[in-house]
Image (tube, rainbow, N blue to C red):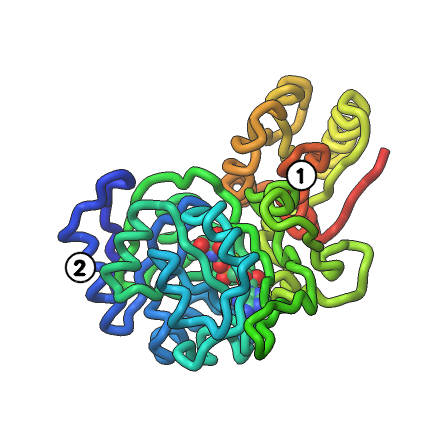
Amino acid sequence: MQTQIQQISAVAPEENIIQQAGAILRGGGLVAFPTETVYGLGADALQPAAAKKIYAAKGRPSDNPLIIHIAKIAALEKITAEIPPQALALAEAFWPGPLTMIFKKSDAVPYETTGGLDTVAVRLPSHAVAVKLIEAAGGYVAAPSANASGRPSPTMAARVFEDLNGKIPMILDGGAVGIGIESTIVDVSGITKNADGTWDVGQLPMILRPGFITKEMLARVIGEIRTDPGLSPETDMRPKAPGMKYRHYAPKADMKIVQGDAPAVVEFINERTKAARQQGKKVGVLCCEETADAYRTDLRRCLGSRQDEAAIARHLYEALRDMDDAGAEEIFAEDFSALQLGEAIMNRLLKAAAHQVITL
Ligand code: TXA
Ligand code: MG
């Protein structure tokens, strides 16, 4: 299959291109498109055969469910069994935007889309191309990140092409994305409706994947909220989101996170670089603007200033892919847990590093 890369305006998407891509989706085909978080690989969520094609193109395990993308809040009705008031409050506060919620599913949603689960993940993205495409496709687009399973999520069309060339007919290229890490996932399916119409918080809303919308931001809207204990590196519990259990976002190099005072971290990494170089190994560092000049590594990728957390999130995945391209064999990364986005950034970094942390 020939993969066509189609340029499209991120602010005013050309209608003829949207219609062409929408027709592919309605016909049961796949289209990759930009969202504000990362590029997604879309299929009509209500056609079982179309959803199945996503798994084949990505090489994704079939038990890993897909997020259904919608273009308006009212579209929730058809695909969910119940919409708890807390979910509506979160939708009003953060949609369109980088928040995904897990609901009990309705019969309209095929099990091919939910990986066999009775719940469904739903997100209303803010990117104009995504919104227009969802409308043109009939309102319900299943879309995982548009990477080959196991690779870092793509933040630009060229990376989608790298992973999926020959496997999908079209990539809409709307330029680099703004956020760069996937949406925050919140499970609200533990809140159930009683026969008398009141609601029972059987289980508190729970964060299944940290993201750009932080726990504090969510708590300001709905009060108490938990984080899936299965996400902690120190537990044997399985994460509740099936996708969080896979080693993910991984560069090919052996990666380690180094924690400690900035000068000690710099010194440690420089010394390790010298030693590795003597063995003929190429070493890379993922760092911030404040320390970048102090490193003597072969490769250096500065994610941004610690004063600009969004930049660090936005550049993370591209830096990991870039390290692969540059042939890094060993990567050291600074620790970013002190940031407000620290939970989201470290969740990805720890996975990329297979949880290898050096504490000085
Ligand atoms: O920002 C995003 O969410 C991007 C863009 C394209 O919208 N999409 C994305 O999709 O990150 P994906 O497939 O790469 O990640 C979806 C995650 C997986 O970890 C999956 O296991 C989880 O959501 N998930 C989906 N449905 C679920 C469900 N019913 N219950 C629990 N977890 C679910
Ligand atoms: Mg993904």
Q: Say what secondary structure mark 1 lies in.
A: helix
In this rendered view, identify the residue nearer to me: 184 or 327. 184
Q: Which residue is mark 1?
A: 342
The amino acid type, in three-letter code, at marker 2 is Gln
Give percent across and percent down for residue 206. Answer: 66, 58
Viewport quadrant of the C terminus = top right
Q: Which residue is mark 2?
A: 20
Which residue sits at x=30%, y=64%?
139
Which residue sits at x=31%, y=61%?
31
Q: Earlier in the sequence, mark 1 or mark 2?
A: 2
Residue 243 to residue 16: above or below: below
Give percent across and percent down for residue 315. Answer: 51, 36
Which residue sits at x=64%, y=46%?
219
Within-10-Å neighbours for mark 1: few <14, some 14–19, many 20+: many
In this rendered view, identify the residue nearer to me: 192 or 252. 192
In this rendered view, identify the residue nearer to me: 261 or 295. 261
In screen coordinates, is 250 left or right of 60? right
Q: Say what secondary structure mark 2 lies in.
A: helix
Viewport quadrant of the N terminus = bottom left
